[in-house]
Image: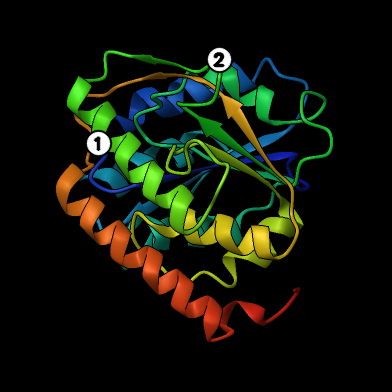
Amino acid sequence: MSGKPYLTIIIPARNEENRLPKTLGEITRFFRTEPYTFEILVVENASDDGTAQVAAAFAGEHEHIRLLRETRAGKGNAVRAGMLAAYGQYRFMADADLSMPVDQIPRFLPPAQENADIVIGSREAPGAIRYNEPHYRHVGGRMINTLIRLLALPGLHDTQCGYKCFRAEVAQDLFACQTLTGWSFDIEILYIARRRGYTITELPIPWYYQAESKVKPVQDAIRMISDIFKIRRNSRLGIYNRGKV
């Protein structure tokens, strides 16, 4: 690919050999009709299936697709590696299951969003629609987000949705300071962003529950609560003070 693209779509992928071909195909077909340049950066994340081979095959056939290997397990590791290796002026993280339709991505970008440093997809903001999600998953998610609002990020309805867009310089600044490697990295990144005065826009989206989701509600909730207290401790210790404040 010659020159830097306008948009990088970062896909963290651990054991996604089955879902990745459909996702890469849908994103490619859609953005070939859009008026700006783009790249897809697949970050293979310590998989024990053929995820890397699938991504490498697509990259060999399409110049706008790149494969990055992150050998340390953890979604936070994968997204951080992708954000810091991306070339795009805007850097968009997307789940490999594409539970938000690809045609929603332009809503995160100018001209729809002109002044936001960060735009986060929300399954709970007014106007959002969830499809096919089991009731217990919704209730559990609401409980966790209530704790997140109380302890770390007041005012945000949904910090854990897998669709977020960052201006390039904002991504470089925030992800260079990230310390958490697992599911809670979103909370840490948004917490640092708030400290540094970046604007965060919460965008309601349509979202489709995927039965093959890798989220483990109870285990991940316990870990997330622990991580919130790590974030608060890091803040007290000044760990997030380096670079821009």
What kind of residue is marked 2? Gly
Looking at the image, the residue that sits furthest to the front is 150
Q: Give above or below for 205 relative to 20.
A: above
In the rendered image, residue 39, in percent from the top left (x then y), is placed at: 61, 39
Tell me the crowding category of disc 1: few under 14, some 14 to 19, or many 20 or more residues within 10 angstroms, Cα based.
Answer: some
Q: Give above or below for 174 relative to 28.
A: below
Depth check: give the residue in front, 164 or 238.
Answer: 238
Kindly identify which residue carries mark 2: 127
Quadrant where the C terminus sits is bottom right
User: Which of disc 2 and disc 1 is earlier in sequence?
Assistant: 2
Quadrant where the N terminus sits is top right
Q: Is residue 84 visible?
A: yes
Depth check: give the residue in front, 79 or 142.
Answer: 142
Horizontal side of residue 197 vs 155, given as left or right = right
Which of the 4 image quarters holds residue 51?
A: top left
In the rendered image, residue 122, in percent from the top left (x then y), is placed at: 51, 30
Tell me the crowding category of disc 2: few under 14, some 14 to 19, or many 20 or more residues within 10 angstroms, Cα based.
Answer: few
In the rendered image, residue 171, in percent from the top left (x then y), is placed at: 66, 57
- Residue at 31% in and 36% down: 141
- Residue at 27% in and 13% down: 132
What kind of residue is marked 1? Gly
Kindly identify which residue carries mark 1: 140
Q: Give above or below for 239 relative to 183.
A: below
- Residue at 83% in and 33% down: 114
As helix, strand or loop, the secondary structure at mark 1 comes to: helix
Depth check: give the residue in front, 62 or 191.
Answer: 191
Q: Give above or below for 12 relative to 237.
A: above
